[in-house]
Amino acid sequence: MQPGRLDLTIYAGSTRNIQVQWKGGDPAVPVDITNYTARMQIRKRAGDPVIIDELTTANSRIAITNAAQGILEVKFPATTTAAYDFCVAVYDLELVAPDTTTVYRILEGSVTLSPEVTK
């Protein structure tokens, strides 16, 4: 399955929450993600050993808000975005099935940081 592409702009020092819905099939229908976990990493480039930020369901930065409809929310709190120090980076968002070995990359893209002026 090919992941969707969504390029993000993050505003440093500002809260940003993004709602994502995973759909599959033809025609596309919501995928039930009951008992799934989610994870996302931001890096300057793919393969870079330095992780700029890591968001997971375990650290509550990703919340599955409607599992039956495949909806989750990715959370960027203002305190976190204020500490970002990059211009452009990359990310991907993965869902891990309840068997913990099946992983689906559902979304990927770039992250552009808009610097904060008012502090």
Image (tube, grey):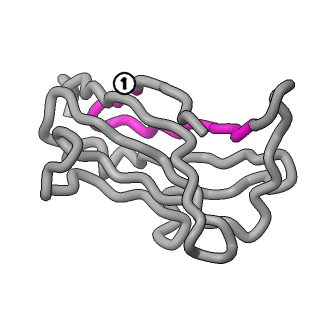
Q: Where 68 falls versus 37 (above or below)?
A: above
Q: Name the element at disc 1.
A: strand
The part of the image, by quadrant, that contains residue 8 is: top left
What residue is shown at x 82% (from left), y 40% (from top)?
30
Q: Could you classify mark 1 by the number of other residues whose Cα lies within 10 Å: few (under 14), some (14-19), or many (20 or more)? A: few
Q: Where 43 falls versus 100 (above or below)?
A: above
**Residue identified by numbered label 1:** 9
Which residues, given as a range, are shown in magenta? Answer: 8-23
- Looking at this view, is 24 or 43 the one in front? 24
Magenta segment: does it hold 71? Answer: no
Quadrant where the N terminus is found in the figure: top right
The part of the image, by quadrant, that contains residue 71 is: top right
What residue is shown at x 37% (from left), y 35% (from top)?
14
Q: Position of residue 81 (x, y in %)?
A: 30, 43
- Looking at this view, is 100 or 85 the one in front? 100
Quadrant where the C terminus is found in the figure: top left
Q: Where 104 falls versus 10 (above or below)?
A: below
What residue is shown at x 69% (from left), y 73% (from top)?
98
What residue is shown at x 59% (from left), y 65% (from top)?
102
- Looking at this view, is 5 or 56 the one in front? 5
Q: Position of residue 33 (x, y in %)?
A: 75, 58
Is 1 displayed left or right of 30 in the figure? Answer: left
Most common SS among magenta residues: strand
Q: Position of residue 10 (x, y in %)?
A: 35, 30
Is 67 displayed left or right of 84 in the figure? Answer: right
Disc 1 residue type (three-letter)? Thr
Magenta segment: does it hold 14? Answer: yes
Q: How many marks?
A: 1
